[in-house]
Amino acid sequence: MNTPQADPKDRPARLAVGVVGAGRVGPALAASLQLAGHRPVAVSGVSDASVRRATTLLPDVPIVPPAEVLARAELVLLTVPDDALPGLVEGLAETGAFRPGQLIVHTSGRYGVGVLEPALRAGGLPLALHPAMTFTGTPVDVQRLAGCSFGVTAPEELRLAAEALVIEMGGEPEWIAESDRPLYHAALALGANHLVTLVAEAMELLHQAGVSAPDRMLGPLLGAALDNALRSGDAALTGPVARGDAGTVAAHVAELRKHAPGTVAGYLAMARATADRALAHGLLKPELAEDLLGVLASGAAQQGGTGQQGGTEGSGR
């Protein structure tokens, strides 16, 4: 969507920005805010990798403990893993680190602003701004934020400020209700995280099949498939499952069981999901679906009997 530029009166004032958790996300967001005129003043990071990211993306910004980040910053980015966020917020609240009027932003996809309740009780202003983007921890991330959608959750009175911050980072705000955050995050993980697994497995199988450049072979195919799926949804389904080619699917399962048993369960699960969607949308003919579903059921039954062994063998690839 094309988001209109925020009215000047709705734009946040130039803020001192602090980052707690110099993973792949925090330094990139702070660097992006710096380009918009804000001023990174402190970052916390423990591991060597975190320190390198911070010094690369935020040169000359001091690396200090989390409590000192909050003491220096007017806008605090809490960019730690999802499971670590509640404990971090509770711990900072117990030490009195949050200040009235301080913008407290987390970037977790899973949580809304409820997880920031301890900061709210201390007078902080809670925002949940989750960039729907995969990060590398390098300067390219700042460029990728241009046009990136952010899942935004905030109290109604802070909605304009939250959306303005996203726009200043070059992003597109998408409002997500508090109760919908877990579903929103599950959808993104299903699409992005599992895609990486599928692509990596496909590349390994092509390499086993003698293809010298699996990435070059898959690039145009997957690019076209993604574009078609985004444009047409289920109408873009192609391949032996959507066509009801039960014999071909059976051959696939046999080959995978022989050469890469760890991939069989995933293949069967995705094939069944594809068959269900193709059948529901009239792409898979009912008279062909019966044999196909029989092949998938048979494969799943075999997998159930040897799944533990197959998983162990597959993990060694």
Image: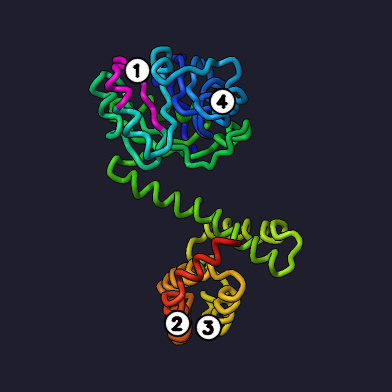
Amino acid type of the residue that numbered disc 4 sits on in the rendered structure: Val
Callout 2 secondary element: helix
Q: Residue furthest left?
A: 121
Q: Does residue 97 belong to the magenta stretch?
A: yes
Mark on residue 298?
Answer: 2
Residue beneath the point at 50% across and 34% down: 171
Residue 202 visible? The answer is: yes
Counting residues from the start of the chain, the first of labels 1 and 3 encountered is 1
Q: What residue is disc 4 on?
A: 51
The residue depicted at 41 percent of the width and 22 percent of the height is 76
Q: CA distance from mark 2 to mark 1?
A: 59 Å
Q: CA distance from mark 1 to mark 4?
A: 25 Å
Residue 122 position within the rendered picture, expressed as x and y whole percent measured from the top left: 25, 19
Furthest-right residue in this view: 212
* Nearer to us in this view, 148 or 189: 189
On the picture, is 53 further left or further right than 283? right
**Residue 216 figure quarter:** bottom right
Q: Which residue is mark 1?
A: 102
Look at the numbered discs 2 and 1 and tell me whether their residues touch, using CB distance below 8 Å: no
Tell me the amino acid under the disc marked 3.
Ala
- The three-letter amino acid code for the residue at tag 1 is Gln
Q: Position of residue 182 (x, y in %)?
A: 34, 46
Sequence-first disc among 2 and 1: 1
On the image, the x and y values in percent for residue 308 come to: 45, 69
